[in-house]
Each structure stands twice: as structure tokens, then as C-alpha cells.
Amino acid sequence: MNLSEVFQQHFQKAASVTVSSAGRVNLIGEHTDYNEGLVLPTPIVQRCTMLLETRADSLVQVFSLQKNQLLEYTLGSEVAGRDWLDYIQGVTQVLNQDGFVFTGFDLVFSSDVPLGSGLSSSAALLVTTVKAIRQAFHLEISDLEAAQIAQRAENGLVGARVGLLDQMACSLGRNGEALFIDFKTLETKTVVLPKNLELVILHSGLTHSLSAGEHGSRNYKTRRAECEQACALLRIHSLRDLLPHDFERVAALPAPFAQRAKHVISENARVLKAITALETGDLETLGALFYASHASMRDDYDVSEPEIDLIVDLARETKGIYGARLTGGGFGGSVVMIADVGMGRAAGEAIAAEYSKRTGNTPRLLSPSE
Ligand code: GLA
């Protein structure tokens, strides 16, 4: 059954609005967004698709195809703790706070962005929700504002204090292009991906959550707090204010603040170099930057896992792969790799098979797509 049929079956009417947004893979520039730094994401094939029809009353009925579940609430009564419905509730709550005028609606959505994969399943769902409501009620919201509304919903009712990288990537990203974002100014620049490059994305099968305080102090929230603490100790506004020549000053900080700050400074510098490498089609340099970024996330930022490191190590031994790194928030999720065009599938499958043999985990090759 396709989505329109599902909609018809649940709501006995057709939907006039169809909207979809892709997940994203961050090529490089990790844990820099909330430090006013630099990032370089690009859309993935997997996406969230939504069908919506307005209602005359203030009821919101939502059917999730993956969960095979219909949940509902009334506008104005949004409350956290209702599982995946929190994403929809979070958006209507923010739109309401901003004074946008809209009624209830019926909605069906489906997403093939794997949950907890570091590929922005949350942002794809949130951004798609904002855009579906925008279209249905003719709201004046730009794509950048849609991303900001989605972030506020995630920070607010959903309860994950994430940066703006994922939402901007999902809202503004275009196929075949990387989106450079400078989070000091929110300026963006398009970087066309070279024709000789193929992205390989392998989900480790280890899922993560950005809202929970899992793994003791090894979580997203703690890393953010550590960066804020590093700034306080250095008496600076954000880690973006530092450049590679400040390494000595940073090294004088106590652990783990020195390491966290070092990662952010070095990662920002790598993003700029990666743009030049992409613009010149220099896969060797880009690959080296990927490996360096991974080492920094593993050793200085401490957001990797042994299984993820294994995938990156296997990539090093695999023909046709130039570089590999953990992508997204970390503590599980996916590895993004650079391959020669046409080499990605075989290389990705070989790495997945060896990884699965050694760990017993079930990896999933998400790009080149199935
Ligand atoms: C998650 C967050 C983003 C960003 C990345 C790490 O995806 O949602 O805001 O901080 O982690 O780069």
C-alpha cells in the first residue's frame, strides 16, 4: 500500500499536501555547530515523507507507518512523554508560541532514515512537519526559519539540546551538493560534490540517543557542557574564537577541557581544507582529513566506540576507500567513507561483512543505496 492509500484508509479522505525531507550525512565538521563553528553536510537518499490534510477543529491525528500506530492530541495541549508524537507536538507548540494561525490536521508519515544512526532521522521528521504545516496553512516561514523552528521543537518538548546542523542540512540541503554552514553568522555556501567521488555510508547497528544521559558522562549533553566550561576557563565567548595558533593556550587547560577544545579548533580547520579538496576533486587529501577527523573524535572528543573504530580501521585496508570517519553525534551510529566512483558498493559490502563477522552486529549499507 502506498502512502496515499494509507491516508485514505485511516482518514477516509485524500491528502492535499505532500512534503518530504532527506536525512543528512555530515561529511566533516562534527560537534562544531554548537561551538559557532563550521560544518559540511549533504543529503542522503533516505527521507521522511508526509501527507497532510487540514481539519476544521483542533484535533491532530498522526499515523506513523513504521510504528503502525495512530496517535492524537488537541492543539494547545502538547505535553512531553508521548514517544514519537513528541516531534509533531513539539512543532505545533513552537508554531503556536510564534503566533502562527492554523487548525488541527490529519497526517501520515513514513521515514526510511534509520533511527539513532547519526543521519538525522529526528531532524528529517521535524523539518518535514514544519514544511507540511507551512504548506497546508500558507504560513510565511523561510527554509532557514523552518530549520530553526524544528531545532526549538527538539530542544524544547522533545528534550534534546542539539545544535542547528541537522535541521539546516535537512531543510536547505540539495542532492549532489554539500552545504557549508558557518554557525557564527549562519552564512551558507554550496560546494558541488566532485564527479569522481562516491559516498559510502555504513550504519554500525549501534544506535544512540542525543536526549538521554546514557553512558555516565559519555553523552552529547556532557560534551556540550564541557565546551561551555572550556570557554569559561579561557574567558572567551565560544571555541570558534580560537585558531590553531592558540593550541598552547588550550593545552594548559585541565583534562578533559584541553582535549575537547583541541578537537573543535582542529575540526574547524579541517572543514576549510575539505572544501578546497572537494572543489579540486582531491580525494586523497579529503580522505586524509576524514581519518584525522575520526582520530580527533576518538581521542580528543571521546565520542567514538570500539565498533565504530573497527569500521574505520577496516576502511583503511580496503581498496577504493580514501578515508572514513564517524559521522553525527557519536556514541554509535554510522561511518561515512569516500570512495572512487563505482567502487563504493563492493568496498562497503566487504567492510560490512568483515565487521559483522568480528562483532556479531548487524550493519547496514545505506549508501550507495539499496
Ligand atoms: C548531532 C546534533 C547536531 C551536531 C552533531 C555533531 O547530530 O543534532 O546538532 O551537534 O550531533 O556534529
Image (cartoon, rainbow, N blue to C red):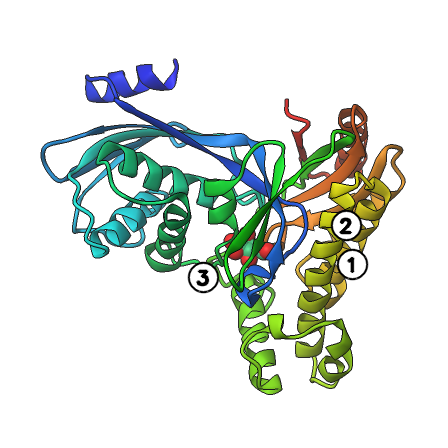
N-terminal of the pair, mark 2 or mark 1, is 2
x, y percentage for residue 112?
50, 30
Three-letter code, disc 3: Arg
Q: Could you tell me how far apart the alpha carbons at marks 3 and 2 are, in whole angstroms?
A: 26 Å
x, y percentage for residue 332?
63, 50
Question: Which residue position holds label 2?
Answer: 290
Q: Residues within 10 Å of mark 3 (few under 14, many from 20)?
A: some
Vertical order, 305 against 131 (above or below): below
Q: Are marks 3 and 1 in contact (CB under 8 Å)?
A: no
- Between 230 and 237, the one lying in front of the other is 237
Q: Residues within 10 Å of mark 1 (few under 14, many from 20)?
A: some
Determine whether the residue tagged by mark 2 lies in a helix, strand or loop: helix
- Residue at the spot 76% in from the left edge and 54% down from the top edge: 273
Residue 84 in sight in this render: yes
- Residue at the spot 32% in from the left edge and 56% down from the top edge: 157
Determine whether the residue tagged by mark 1 lies in a helix, strand or loop: helix
Q: Could you tell me how far apart the alpha carbons at marks 3 and 1 are, in whole angstroms?
A: 25 Å
For residue 257, what is the image quadrant?
Answer: bottom right
x, y percentage for residue 114?
54, 36
